[in-house]
Image (cartoon, coloured by chain):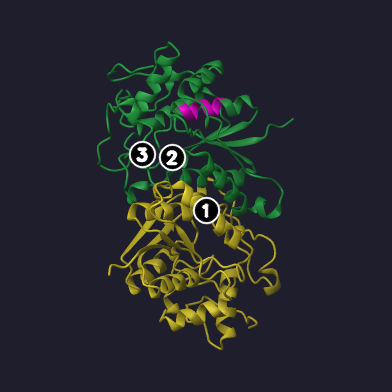
Chain colours: A green, B yellow
Amino acid sequence: MKKPKAVVLLSGGLDSTTTLAMAKALGYECHALTFRYGQRHEVELAAAQRVATQMGVAEHVIANIDLRIFGGSALTSDVAVPKNREMKDLGGGIPITYVPARNTVFLSFALAWAEVLEASDIFIGVNALDYSGYPDCRPEYIEAYQKMANLATRVGVEGTCNFKIHAPLMQMTKAQIIEEGLRLGVDYSETLSCYDPEADGHACGHCDACLLRQRGFKHLGLEDPAPYQSRIEVPA
Amino acid sequence: MKKPKAVVLLSGGLDSTTTLAMAKALGYECHALTFRYGQRHEVELAAAQRVATQMGVAEHVIANIDLRIFGGSALTSDVAVPKNREMKDLGGGIPITYVPARNTVFLSFALAWAEVLEASDIFIGVNALDYSGYPDCRPEYIEAYQKMANLATRVGVEGTCNFKIHAPLMQMTKAQIIEEGLRLGVDYSETLSCYDPEADGHACGHCDACLLRQRGFKHLGLEDPAPYQSRIEVPA
């Protein structure tokens, strides 16, 4: 039997890589989609390519979109990325690393591709627990997106299939995500989650993404295998 | 009093130009957004620039996004644009000129920009009557998009304002749109609606967009002032 196709958003970070592993384990033929969106951490594209190759996706597309024309985030402008924040602050409020409407833009490209591929499944690695306070990582957002997607498209009109936006990490802690990825054979040394990495691909070790990730590994009694520039002691 | 800001999607065609005139007339400071999305009709960008200048927008951004990486439409691939279709066929089924998820992608960029500008109003010139059968031109789609947008964004979480997606042409016939535009002083000789224009900016006169537009003018007893390569007799 032919595998059903899925479009998987892949940044090359811990969450999206785990999501890809989960989509693969569910039996989908995975079409990975990565964005060059003017992010300051372009080395994440190299991580996405390593992961896509290693995990044997059917196809990997890197789409060029320039979100810098609008500005408004530390990830796409010259505002400094916050470092060494207290764990208690990581879930509160919307941080400056929030990129306006980013997931909406990403999902829209995934939807366009899915429609061309005649795929009805889209995977995104958003997470509502450890998620750093982004509005477009909440379950009610994903649900509203899915509803819109089914009205937006050819298949929505013709009634031939229904788009499903899968967010399998939504209710998982970072430690649970890592545990599941390890079970599925993910090699986390190849992934890069950092908001402000070195040009050589080392993670900074101090931004919100690095701290959350290291804490997840520590909680499992493991050391994060990704290359770090330096580390601070994080609580489990 | 400071004018409220709005993001207006502007292709340089008849519908989006009229929408811009309507947003201006409603008192908005208009920020026009145009896409270079790999369309075969790149001369529409020149039309958008002429219109933006002539109508005195606060700002005009042309965003580069490459929808050709996915293919799937006559407007972004090598499939021929249908010509001289019967009027009765123009509203039935989804034509090959449909670009998968195009309005969803466009609105997502508009949403990103609106969030940065702290604007809560987005204008799009979609139309459900004369609309050529695109799924993403229906009122239920716009409504679902608006709901999603209010969950996707900073303001949606903070409750500081509500995004409104304005589709003022939704229930208007092409003739009514033209009538309203003329009342507001739109110079339609500067606009370009054609799916398959000549490199010099002449409209083909035979694609669905040309036919619908010419019929609208004819219905009002007027001749379409846009430059055409050739014309066929269209019924009013």
> Horizontal and vertical percent for residue A36?
40, 40
Q: Which residue in the structure is indicated by mark 1?
A: B147
Do the CB atoms of the residues marked 3 and 1 lie less than 8 Å apart?
no
- Say which mark, if any, is on residue A93: 3
Residue beneath the point at 33% across and 51% down? A69
Q: Is residue A42 left or right of residue B196?
A: left
Which is closer to the viewer, label 2 or label 3? Answer: 3
Q: Is residue B75 left or right of residue B186?
A: right
> Horizontal and vertical percent for residue A39?
35, 39
SS for tag 1?
helix
The three-letter amino acid code for the residue at tag 2 is Phe
Q: Is residue B66 visible?
A: yes
Q: In front here: A123 or B35?
A: A123
Quadrant showing the C terminus of chain A: top left
The three-letter amino acid code for the residue at tag 3 is Gly
Q: Which residues are magenta?
A: A15-21
Task: Calculate the distance from the C-alpha at mark 3 to the C-alpha at mark 1.
Answer: 22 Å
Q: Chain of mark 3?
A: A
Q: In front here: B122 or A130?
A: A130
- Say which mark, if any, is on residue B102: none
Q: Is residue A191 above or below residue A154?
A: above
Magenta span contains residue B91? no
Q: In front here: B32 or A167?
A: A167
- Say which mark, if any, is on residue A35: 2
> Horizontal and vertical percent for residue B69?
51, 45
Q: Are marks 3 and 1 on the same chain?
A: no
Location of residue A222 (image quadrant) = top left
Q: In front here: B1 or B146?
A: B1
Closer to the chain start, of discs 2 and 3, is: 2
